[in-house]
Amino acid sequence: MRPLLLHLDHFGSFREPVTVDFSDTEYFALVGPTGAGKSTIIDAICFALYGTVPRWGRENAVAHALAPSVAAGKVAMVFDSDGRRYGVARSMVRDAKGAVRTKEARLDELDPAAPLDQVFDAVVRPIAEGENVTPEAQRVTGLEYRFFTQCVVLPQGRFAEFLHAAPRERQDLLVQLLDADVYERIRQSAAREEEAAKQAASFARDQLAKLSGATDEAERELADRLAALRRLSDTIGSDLDLLRSREDDIRRAEQERAAVAERRSVLASLRMPAAVPTLASAGRAATEAAERLAAEVETLEADDHEAYEALTALGDRGAPRAALAALDARERLAAEAARTRAEAGGAAASLGELATARETAEQALAAAEAQRERLRDAHAAAHLVARLAVGEPCPVCRHPVTELPRHDAPADMRTADRALAGARERAERARSAHARAETSASMLAAQADRLESELAALPAPVDRAALEGTLAAIAKAEEVAGEARQALRAGRARLDKARAAAAQAERQAETAWRDLEAARDRLLVSGHQDDPPPPLDRDDLHHAWTDLLGWRDRAAQAALAALTEREERLTRARDLLAADRRRLTERLAEHGVVAPPDASPDQLGAAVATAVARADAALERLREERRRAADLERQVAAKEHEAKVAHELALRLRANAFERWLCAEALAVLVASASDTLRELSDGQYELALADKTGDIEVIDYGEAGMRRSARTLSGGETFQAALALALALSGAVARGLDSIFLDEGFGTLDPATLDTVATTLERLAAGQERMIGVVTHVPALADRVPVRFEVRRDGNGSHVRKAAIAP
């Protein structure tokens, strides 16, 4: 990682934006008085990459990133790593409670051809944002945060201690700087692995204990039982067939017994119907009654025919009724015409009086209208007189008025108006009455004329007495005919009832015969073919029933004897089945097969098959348990071995000898690498080596013929060279390909000669290696020998940095 451009905006003590350009710098110094902010620039490089600074005490701490008086700030850096150019930026804010947090962070790959003043805008591809920036920065630089703080900012003073330290102190320091505590983590992991393996072995032993019954003997016993059950299954077939044959015998015996019992039931249910003895006489009586009533109906039909012949001879009553109705209508019409004509004459007589009244009312109306006109003129004259003035022209004649005329006060116009209205009302009533009378007289005269015309159009009147005599004769004939028809209906009803009774008796007889035939058929079907019922006497129903019942009694005795014999046979068959089943059940019990006492042959066979299947499954389970037990035994052995190996590893890593051996090997590698660097820095005069007995670091001085002496005998400058060589060797071991190193060391404690040696050493280091070297110092004698200086100062507005001219 090689920084090119660093931008600080309100970061730490830098309260104003500032940009530090490292692009053309190989060897530089950050100079300035103590507290000016030199180390803050190194902090900004670390914060831009990892979001925190070692001096702040703990990782992820950002509280010191902002100056106390500002609310927001930003750090951005452009750097090269592994041939690519990157830009990283982080912005910070202070919230309302004063806490500082990272607001935004991003890492981008930049275009290396872009000018540095525009490079932040030349993004080739975004790489990460937010929390992903730090792990991606570690990936592109190849440096974890802890290695960066050990290798980029070299703690030179600690390595002088390392050079002069006792072996125990050196071991502790190597453990810290080389991250040797990883072996302690390995030891702890081994201890956890040991415990986990012990637990797994214990669990496997517990599972194995549960399978203690899975033995060779148990397997042999189950195999023998399975073989015995299979032999039983192979030989039980004949026994089961015998049981099935016994059951068939029982079913046949039960069927025969049921058939005999059914015959007895049929015989017992045979009963003669109660109506059979009297059914024949009742049928004959019903037939005779029907024949007698049929003769009576024939007589009634003759009487009915004669009555209707007489009624027909008298003719229809419609004609005399119509003639009588026409006579009634003629008389009503004549009376109405006479009345209407009289009313018309009266109306004509009243027209004269109404005409006189109308004329009188019209004259009174004319007089009232004339009187109102005179009164209106009088009121107009009185009104005009009131407006006249002597000497003024008259509005009527236009002549001057010489004297005002005198007029009496006229009567009230309202009285005249009421009189006129009354006269008009009376005249209108008189006119209306006269008009109505005219209309009524005209209508009555027209109605009288119409009625008289209708009367003239009617046929001549006939004799009323003759018509009434004809109608009376017809009514009497209708009465006689109705009585004859009623008697006929009653006779026919009695005949129908008698015939229905005769038909009912016949149907009962037929039903009784059918019942008798059906009963005989049931007896034949129920098994009486050997002794069939007697044939039926079709001439006498009662005699046929009597013969059949006699035969029934004899057949019932035979059926009872047959039933007793069938029950004895059924009992013998059941006893044989029970004995055979009991013997087979006892045989099954000897093999551990339990079956119900009344189990069928199929159930017994299924019980044996189930026992075989269960024995087979039990044997397979036992064999599986034995295989599982073998697996568990192997697991116990493997886990115990793993626990033993982990225990040995943890035990060896816990021993101090391992740490001493590890540090000794690491120190030998570091001293060999540092020796090469020191030989180059000292122009071949010095090398470093380890003392064989004490383990101290010694110096081989080729200026003194290769003499070995303690490193404590080196001068200050020589000590710095040796310590710097060790620091570079350690940084090379920790991180390969490091492109920049910053030395933040207290050079002010060195004497001028030593300071000169240090400066010369740094110059040789900068000239001979391809890496950026930065020195943080406030010593002018050292700063003046560095080709590029960044001067850092601090005032009331915070820290400021300026790139000074290159020294000659």
Image (cartoon, rainbow, N blue to C red):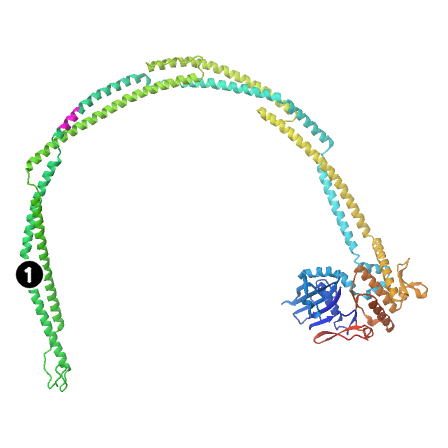
Residue 559 in percent (x, y) is at: 45, 15
Q: Residue at x 10, y 59 (%)?
A: 435
Q: Is residue 450 left or right of residue 519?
A: left
Q: Nearer the viewer, residue 5 or 753?
A: 5
Quadrant housing the N terminus: bottom right
Q: Is residue 43 left or right of residue 282?
A: right
Which amino acid, by three-letter code, is at mark 1? Ala
Quadrant of the rendered image containing residue 179: bottom right
Disc 1 target residue? 355
Q: Is residue 29 above or below residue 332?
A: below
Quadrant housing the C terminus: bottom right
| Secondary-structure class at tag 1 | helix
Q: Is residue 713 above or below residue 381?
A: above
Q: Residue at x 77, y 49 (%)?
A: 191
Quadrant of the rendered image containing residue 241: top right
Residue 742 in percent (x, y) is at: 78, 67
Was residue 104 drawn as part of the magenta stretch in this picture? no
Q: Residues within 10 Å of mark 1 (few under 14, many from 20)?
A: some
Q: Is residue 557 above or below residue 336?
A: above
The magenta stretch spans which residues?
Answer: 302-309
Quadrant of the rendered image containing residue 274: top left
* Main secondary structure type of the part rendered in magenta: helix
Q: How many marks?
A: 1
Q: Is residue 151 above or below residue 618?
A: below
